[in-house]
Amino acid sequence: FGSSCVGNVLGRGSGGAMDAPSEFVYHRKDLETFPTSDHASLQAFWAQEVKAADATNDGSDSEQGTATTATETEASQAARVLGRYFDNSDQPIDSKYRFVVRPDNPEAVKLKVVRTTRLTPTEYERNVFHVVLRVDGTPVAGYEPGDSLGIYPVNSADAVTDFLEALGFEGSTILELDSFFIGEEEGTYVMTLEQVCRDYLDLFGCPTKSFYLALSKYARDIMERTELATLSLDRCADALAERVARSVTFASTLVEFPSLVLTPKNLLDIVPLMKPRLYSVASSTRMFQKEVHLLAVTHHWETSEKHIRTGLASGYLERLGTPGARVHTVVGALVRSAALKLPTDSVKPVVMAGIGTGMAPFRGFIEERAARKRLGEEMGCMRLYFGARHKHAEFLYEKELEMYEREGLLTMRCAWSRDQAQKVYVQHLLEEDQDQLWELLKPEVGGHFYVCGPTDPLPAIRSALCELFIARGAGAGYLDAMEAEGRFAVEVY
């Protein structure tokens, strides 16, 4: 089997005595061996592989028995398992199965990576980058500004290999899973242990108290069993916090305690699935009909032991832009936003406060209105407050934003927090611009105000707006009224 998942297959009946399972997984190497659209080639391939496997295992009454022997090759093991799910009848292959991208999310699709572009200078400490994905022919093509794309990250192949070797597991071990994925269609998923660890298990996430308790049951040594179980207790919060500060992971914990006795399927019972990471769409289909654009920053942090760690999803997306990167697609699912939506009335003013990568949805907002304005539609004014550290390094999309400003669509106000002795933030600009903001947000005009970015600045931004409304006689409750009407919306992380 190859090392990259291509998709899952939904079976519809083998035509033989055994009922076919619902789903199983092919890998990229398999699909390169024969064309998936050629049903005859597919059947012939498996017929040959099954025959070869039968020859390898001839002598079923020997000590090894009819099950997988110690010397069974990976190919024959695959044929033994998957051969049960095919026959050589004339029934078309596609009447028995279909490919799905992820068993745990029927809406997930594969998206081709068109390009990634670093937006900050190469010598700058933060890597903020732009990702372009091809979406035509997929449900994601119907996205709207303000929506998000849930990206399914993938664990580092090298890290997974090291982990499996440390536990003495073979990555090529084939697992037959019939109740692993919540909400899956009835049947059996067949995939390698390597794939499960790489694409599904949150091996390098932070362990929970329930994990330590569940893991303790697999420890043969009484001291290790006690230590693991104790970490699940509230009175051991300090010890748990110390492990969090060291960025201890599920994987490192499994390797840390040598008396643990685990099978590959035990991993599925105690390690949770990775969750998709949401990235706000940074484009408009009116401007890019076949693409979706994302904005991301690589997240690094230092552990208590002075080791540098990288965020799983941001590190994964960053690797897409590495020269020679082998990953050409990502798996994602469209997530509709109920909050960040442009006004249905296109003449209504829009005020946006984006901090850092919180610029993403507002780039989509601006592109949407710019495209419509160029078609002759009347568009309300747009005012963007953007906050970042340094103008020279983090003025994201500077040239295109200045172009929209020259066209009269946009007014920009930027807060560069570290370009002067006294820090300047978005809320300070809001305090300076009370007159202009009130003209856009007062009841008779009905403008909208949006915030996107880190959680920390939100209280100060809300406070600045409340002070504005109080000063104009509307009272602090006016912000709550705007929120209830859908005129004030927030997306923070």
Image: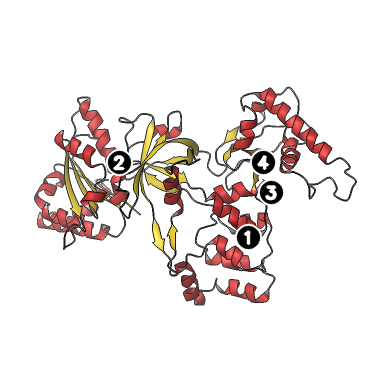
Q: Nearer the viewer, mark 3 or mark 4?
A: 3
Please provide percent x and percent y for residue 217.
Answer: 66, 67
Tag count: 4
Q: Earlier in the sequence, mark 4 or mark 2?
A: 4
The residue under label 4 is 187
Q: Amino acid at mark 3?
A: Thr
| Measured Cα–Cα span from mark 3 to mark 1 | 15 Å
Residue 49 in the image, given as x and y percentages of width and height: 75, 34
Task: Kindly state the secondary structure of the residue where label 1 is placed.
Answer: helix
Q: Residues within 10 Å of mark 1 (few under 14, many from 20)?
A: some
Residue type, label 2: Lys
Residue at mark 4 to residue at mark 1: CA–CA distance: 32 Å
Q: Are marks 4 and 1 in contact (CB under 8 Å)?
A: no
Q: Residues within 10 Å of mark 3 (few under 14, many from 20)?
A: some
Q: Callout 3: helix, strand or loop?
A: loop
Quadrant where the N terminus is found in the figure: top right
- Which comes sooner in the sequence, label 3 or label 1? 1
Q: Disc 4 to disc 2, how far (Cα)?
A: 40 Å
Q: Which mark is residue 341?
A: 2
State the residue position of label 3. Answer: 173
- The residue identified by callout 1 is 166
Tell me if label 3 and label 4 are in contact, CB under 8 Å: no
